[in-house]
Amino acid sequence: MLARIIRHEWQMLKADAVLWVIVAIVGSAIAYGVWNGTRWVHFQEGAIEAARSEERVRFDRLTAQLEKVAAGERVSPFADPRSPSNLGSRLAAKVAVLPPAPLGALTVGQSDLLPSYVRVSTESREAVLASTEVESPLRLLTGRFDLAFVVVYLVPLLVLALAYSMVSGEKEQGTLSMVLAQPVSLGTLVAAKVVVRAAALLVIIVGLGLGTLLMTGVSLADAATRERLLWWVASVAAYMGLWFAIALVGVSLGRGSAATATLLAGLWLLLVVIVPSALTLGVQQLYPVPSRVALVQATRVASDEANAQGARLLAAYYEDHPELATGDAEQAMTDFNVVRLAVNDDIEKRVRPVVAQFDEQLSSQQALVERFRVLSPALVVYEALSDLSGSGQQRHRHFVSQVSGFHDEWRRFFTQKVVAKTPVADLSSLPTFTYSEEPSSALRARMMATLATLLVPAVLLGGLAFIRLRRYAIAG
Amino acid sequence: MLEARHLTKRYGTTTALEALTLTVSPGEVFCLLGANGAGKTTTINLFLNFVDPSEGQALVNGVDVTRAPLESKRHLAYIPETVMLYRNLTGLENLEYFAALAGSTDLSRGSLLKVLERVGLPADAADRRVGGYSKGMRQKVGIAIAVAKGARALLLDEPTSGLDPKASNEFSELLRQVSGDGVAVLMATHDLFRAKESGTRVGIMKRGRLVALHGTDEFSHADLERLYLEHMHD
Amino acid sequence: MIGTIARKELTELSRDGRFRLLAAVILVLAVASTAAGWLQFTAVSRQHAEAQRETREQWLGQQEKNPHSAAHYGVYAFKPASHLSIVDTGLDPYLGVAVWLEAHRQSEMKFRPAQDRTAIQRFGELNGAEVLLVLVPLFILLVTFPVFAGEREQGTLRQLMSLGVAPRLLVAGKALGTLAAVALVIVPVSALAAVAMAWASADSYLAADVSRTVALGATCLVYFLVVTGVGLAVSAWAPSSRVALVTLLGFWFATSLVAPRIATDVAGSLHPTPNAAEFQRALDADLSDPEEARQRLARLQAETLTKYNVTSLDALPVAFSGLSLQSGEDHGNEVFDRHFGRLHDQFSNQARVYQWAGLASPLLAARSLSMALAGTDFEQHRHFAKAAEAYRRDIQRTLNDDIARNQRAGQPYLAGTELWSRVPDFTYDAPSIGWVLGRQATALTVLAGWLTLAGALALLATRRLSATLG
Ligand SMILES: Nc1ncnc2c1ncn2[C@@H]1O[C@H](COP(=O)(O)OP(=O)(O)O)[C@@H](O)[C@H]1O
Ligand SMILES: [Mg+2]
């Protein structure tokens, strides 16, 4: 019976212009979104390559200079390619890259705002991480037209467009009572309608999405990529499921088509536009992150004070780091580079509380967002899609923590050499950075949580709708 | 076949139907008469389980429609004032769909065409989309659904309102044929003439109550009209 | 007659629960976003003013040192928040807030506030402009879609027309009714925002801000008229209120969510910018070309010797180091003007494409105007960056001149407070409204075009009204 109704519904849907309009809209939106995302990934790759090539050129020059110096050429102390201080702070600074993930083209996410590479030197961690890519501010403000935009904003509207008049349309057209005069329950009828619409939409979105993605040359050879794609399909399906459930609740209220459409459009606006931006506003009010101006000033004050104390700080520095005071301490006390180390160390110590305030407020914001994310399925799915494309907060945080580790290692390496005044002869002995991807178990756990957050309300709302449908006013 | 027992429906303070007790046997054509708002549609909706009764029971083939809504609908066919069909499907496709929903097993094109022929739908219309059907053609498809389904009770709500006299006549003729096959018919109508012609019994309703119940052979058409108007007064 | 029709529309709307709910939601959001904007503005203004004062104190408080040391010590310039950023933060979150002005280098402005926010900010910021330009139009569309389509379904339209009401009056009355309903929501919010702004700037509510506020209000009004016209036209044209609703929602979605994204994509493709590493590489290549530096110094040396009519640098009455430093600055300035000029030109060009894209979506023209009037568009950011850079160049010139005048060969030269205070404090004057609107000519024209189009559509609607009664 269900199968027969499904067949009929498919026939009706096929004959309806709405479906084909939707196919056209979704088709072009998906193709454009994937293409656009791919372009962005190419831009990122170009930027990373440019940074790497700058590093290569710099290192080639350094090697040449090292050879010249070894051959007896004299250089100014500020350009000495052997000086660990020069190398660590400028000359040998290394590019630490967060490469675009395999599915990066699906969601641009935060990747246009957060840097995809940083130049690691002995500068402070904040200075190292503060790099930015050149990007049109207008584009940053509006956000990009990527596949995630299509999924997050457009798909729910299409779900609602397909579903809002499922029952009221037939009632207004008069066929509802004809159908229900047969031994068919309204629940069965609605279930069939939902199945047909959901399947059609899912096939269109997943089919076109994966199709265009494959055309852009994404390789599926990697099992991890395949798994991510599966999660992507599952998240999109769950998101659609939730919107069908929301639509069903609207339908089950038994109002006319126009009234149901208004109601559902209002819900869409609330959940996709208003709640996210209100939440942004809320977290910023509850945990305001101070302006970076405060940090600029704090650093400035600290460095004025530290510089004024100069050599005295060095003594304190050696007290803190007795392990370094091995070489000729007497000589070191007057050495410019060693004093600078001590001064920088002191500046960082003074600025740390201000920096901590930023981190603290931001993580409080993040915690609040995580708690209230369930209020908007759009937020939940956006987070998941960014996560799967490796363009979200998660992967970037993972990158930053690795960069921090590398930064520490870099500093330890050069600090020892600066204090001990060991020249660097071999550039290949410098620490190197390679980004290592997060274990897939962590992703899996987050995805399960995402699916649960979408599916539990979907099931509850769907159930509620079906219960309400029993009292649907068929006549009158 | 159709039985109402103290069937009552209240909407808030208005009583749409009050303690209707009625039986319609196979082969009988029961005509419900009454002014607009008398409760005729409510009665039919109760038999279809489109609305829940406030009190009493509606039984189809001895089963309570609220207890076994799907089972009861297997025996019912419903023809509203205008039979509404899917505009984008042909008459035949519509019939096929409804018959399939009704649980008919013989859905071959041949037998469905035969049904359409029997109810007098022009042969060339079966494969046309119903968007262009006249009201008379739609009502015929309605009867065809009932026939294809093998319904044993027919619920009609003012099925001939707005039909031209010829179409109306054809429709009544069909109805007589169907009831001749042993189908119980409950028809709400304003057409006293048709009620006298094709009905076996008439009931006059007023503000939700069945105020008179007579066999059509008890009087002439003029008597029926007088009786009706008498009840409508005061 | 128009008044009667408008009054009936308003009465009907005010009895509609959905309308009341929607109006309440918009009102609450407008109040909340304005309040948040106000808090943000006061916090940022205070921080920036304080920082600007501190940076000046630090500059003046420098101990005795060589002027070039001071040049490397540098000062910071902090971008002040404009009063109208209370209603439209525009591009501000995505542009830097501070720039370090030191010797030899022009820097990009640093610290984009957006980098210190959670990812959900990408769903858009809730500010006054967002409410006015995105939510209110949706409200207008939801109010207008049944205006004719619904009356046609109810059959009341036939009734009205049979009474001999002129279609033109009917359309005008309905438009007026809709706008009156919108005004019910907007007027209290605007009053509140104006009070907030006046309060936030009790001592400095400049005439410029008043004219900008009025212009912003006018922009919104015109945009609302455009949306009302479109809504009424679609309502008159649509076969049913359902179709009218879906069409108008599609219009809203396309113009408010899709068009901005496509417009910025197109702008980016037409006027591409290099990535940061490439930009830096090209800049560095031009800036520190050793061959160029050698030739430039040789030339400077020769010129200076001729100018002072001496044969050796030691015989010069001025310190050559000061001259060569300034020559380096001059060379750098020329390179910076070229490279930053090209980059910023591209951003300006992109913003112009965005204005032109207003042809496809009136929102873009209105948005562009709103950001410009709020002082949060790219042009005004650039204006500030230019002022800061000019200040940097002034500092360098003052210091280098001082070196040239006072440094003696072979002797250390230390300057003190007298020199530091000769460098004036940094002051910044935001451009006039004329300057701003001059750069928004395209957006103004496009919006005017839309207003005409919407008027024409509404007129067409009146024709259509009488034609579709059958
Ligand atoms: N859904 C409903 N809600 C409230 N009252 C109703 C409803 N449906 C019918 N009624 C009332 O019940 C009474 C009977 O209506 P109905 O059965 O449709 O009359 P008829 O079909 O005889 O013209 C009328 O007074 C009508 O107003
Ligand atoms: Mg009736």
Image (cartoon, coloured by chain):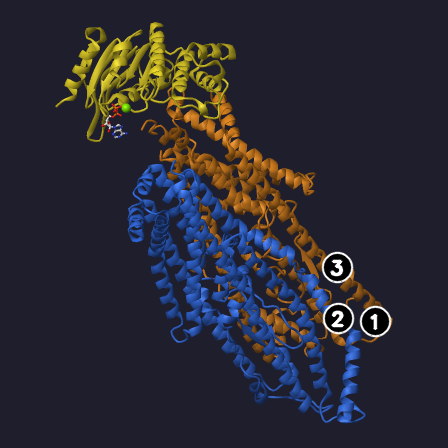
Chain colours: A orange, B yellow, C blue
Q: Which residue is mark 2?
A: A83
Tell us which disc is closer to us: 1 or 3. 3
Query: Can residue C131 be spotted in the picture?
Result: no
Q: For residue C402, which numbered disc appears in the image? A: none
Provide the secondary structure element on which disc 1 rests: helix
Residue C92, x across and y down, in percent: 52, 63
User: Foreground residue, C376 or B216?
Assistant: B216
Counting residues from the start of the chain, the first of labels 3 and 2 encountered is: 3
User: Foreground residue, C420 or C177?
Assistant: C177
Binning the other alpha carbons within 10 Å of mark 1 as few (below 14), some (14 to 19) or many (20 upward) gives some
Q: Which residue is mark 1?
A: A69
Tell us which disc is closer to us: 3 or 2. 3
Residue C274, x across and y down, in percent: 68, 60
Instruction: Indicate the chain on which mark 1 is placed.
Output: A
Query: Can residue C88 be spotted in the picture?
Result: yes
Residue type pointed to by label 3: Ser
